[in-house]
Image: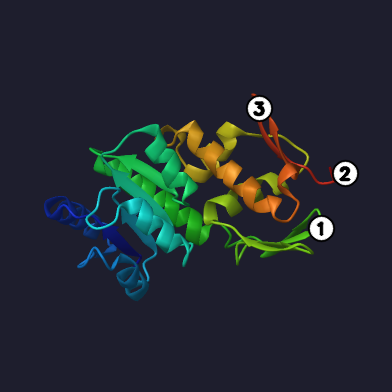
Amino acid sequence: MFKLLLIEDDASLFQEIKDRLLSWSYDIYGISDFSEVLQEFTAIKPDLVIIDIQLPKFDGFHWCRMIRSHSNVPILFLSSRDHPSDIVMSMQLGADDFIQKPFHFDVLIAKIQAILRRVYNYNTDQIELKTWYGAAIDYQKNTVTNDAGTVELTKNEMFILKHLIEQKNKIVSRESLIKSLWDDERFVSDNTLTVNVNRLRKKLDALGLGHFIETKVGQGYMAVEKAEPL
C-alpha cells in the first residue's frame, strides 16, 4: 500500500480527498502542525506528497523546497492558483505535476497512478547502470557521475535523460516524451516539459554535459553521443 501525504489546510476538502483516496486503497496522512511540515514528512516517509500552495505559516513552495532538500519523493501540487508563474515555480522547485482546483477526481487519480508507476516501476526491467559520453548513469540511484563530480536527478529528469540516451543521436519528439512521462498528454502542459528539460540541462552543466542535450526547434530533443566538446 502506497503512503500519500496530503498537505491541505481546508479540513472539509482534506476529508473529501482522503475518503476518495482510501477507496483506492491508498494510505493517507495529513499534517497536524503546519509549522512542522518537514518534521512530519520525515516521520511519515510517504511515497507521494500532495500539497497546496496556500497554507498557514509558510506556503507550499517553501515546503516543496524544504522537502526537495532532503528527498526526491514525487510531489504533486493541488491548488486554486492558476497563474502560469505558479506552475513554472512548482516545476522549477522539483514538483512532478500540478492540478488546478476545482478538479475532477478521476484526473487526480490518473495523475497519482501515473506518477507512482513512473517513479516506482519504470526501471524494474532495465539495467541499473549505463554510460553516456564518459559519464556513468545510475538509474537506481538517479545519479550521473564523471570526473567533474556527481549530480542527483529527480525521477522526471532521469526519465527524460533515459529516453533521450536510449535513442542517442536521434530526435525524440516533445509529444513522445510527454506521453511517456505522464501517460496521457491531455493532462500536462507543453511548458512543463520545457521546464523539466531546462532543469536537467542545468544540472548536467555542472558535469560539462548540458550542451549534449540538443534542442531541435519544432521537433524535440536529442542526446548527442559523439559530439566534440565546445
Secondary structure state at the residue bearing disc 3: loop
Q: Is residue 148 visible?
A: yes
Considering the image in quadrants, where does the N terminus appear? bottom left
User: What residue sits 81% from the left and 46% below the top?
Assistant: 225
- Residue 134, which numbered label? 1
134 relative to 31 in the view: left or right:
right
Secondary structure state at the residue bearing disc 1: loop
x then y, percent, for residue 48 = 38, 60
Task: Identify which amino acid the numbered label 1 is placed on.
Answer: Gly
Give the Cα separation between the discs numbered 2 and 3: 23 Å
* First in residue order: circle 2 vs circle 3: 3
x then y, percent, for residue 26 = 29, 62
Task: Identify which amino acid the numbered label 2 is placed on.
Answer: Glu
88 relative to 57 in the view: left or right:
right
- Residue 219, which numbered label? 3
Query: In front here: 40 or 73?
Result: 40
Judge the density around disc 1: few (<14), some (14-19), many (≥20) Cα neighbours within 10 Å: few
The image quadrant that residue 173 belongs to is: top right
The image quadrant that residue 81 belongs to is: top left
By what rule are the colours in the image chosen? rainbow
- Residue 228, which numbered label? 2
Task: Identify which amino acid the numbered label 3 is placed on.
Answer: Gln
Give the Cα separation between the discs numbered 1 and 2: 12 Å
